[in-house]
Image: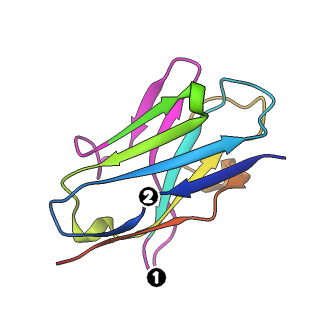
Amino acid sequence: EVQLVESGGGLVQPGGSLRLSCVFSGFPDHDHSIGWFRQAPGKEREAVACIDRRDYFAHYADSVKGRFTISSDGARNTVYLQMSSLKPEDTGVYYCTAPEAGISGCYEEASMYPYWGQGAHVTVSS
């Protein structure tokens, strides 16, 4: 059974930093991609970052480029999202997600990801 568990959310002031973690398990392969989406109140879920674990190439939304960094620790089955220079508009629930086994690469469409974690709340406010 595929499982994704996020942690690390919280309240932070504008300009601050947070690191989210996603521990994953149950995948039959070792090179599936892991993505992060977020959903702000009253808005649709949007792609934030993704790492393609075949070559560890990272993809980012334009709104977070230069501020967020996604990385993978294969030994710990964990993907991290380091968020810096946080803005109030980064507030939302952050979800870790993965595609079906055998489907590689990163996608902006949430419909491409059948596996989701429970979400980590991030609030950026003074």
Residue drawn at x 46%, y 75% as measured from the top left? 43
Nearer to us: label 2 or label 1:
2
Name the side, left or right, on which 84 lies relative to 120. left
Left or right, 72 with reference to 63: right
Question: Is 73 located above or below residue 93 in the figure?
Answer: above
Left or right: residue 55 compared with residue 10: right
Asked which quadrant contains residue 16, the reply is bottom left
Label 2 secondary element: loop
Judged from the image, the secondary structure of the residue bearing numbered disc 1 is loop
Magenta residues? 40-68
Question: Considering depth in this image, is 64 or 75 the residue closer to the camera?
Answer: 75
Residue 92 location, quadrant: bottom left
**74 or 110: nearer the eye?**
74
In magenta segment, residue 89: no
Q: What label does residue 8 carry, if any?
A: 2
Mark 1 sits on what residue?
42
Q: Taking 96 as reference, is 1 left or right?
A: right
Residue 7, numbered label? none
- x, y (%) of residue 102? 77, 28
Label located before the other in sequence (2 or 1): 2
Q: Residues within 10 Å of mark 2 (few under 14, many from 20)?
A: some
**Kind of residue at disc 2:** Gly
Q: Amino acid at mark 1?
A: Gly
- Identified at 22% across, 40% down, the residue is 66
Relative to 15, residue 4 above or below: above
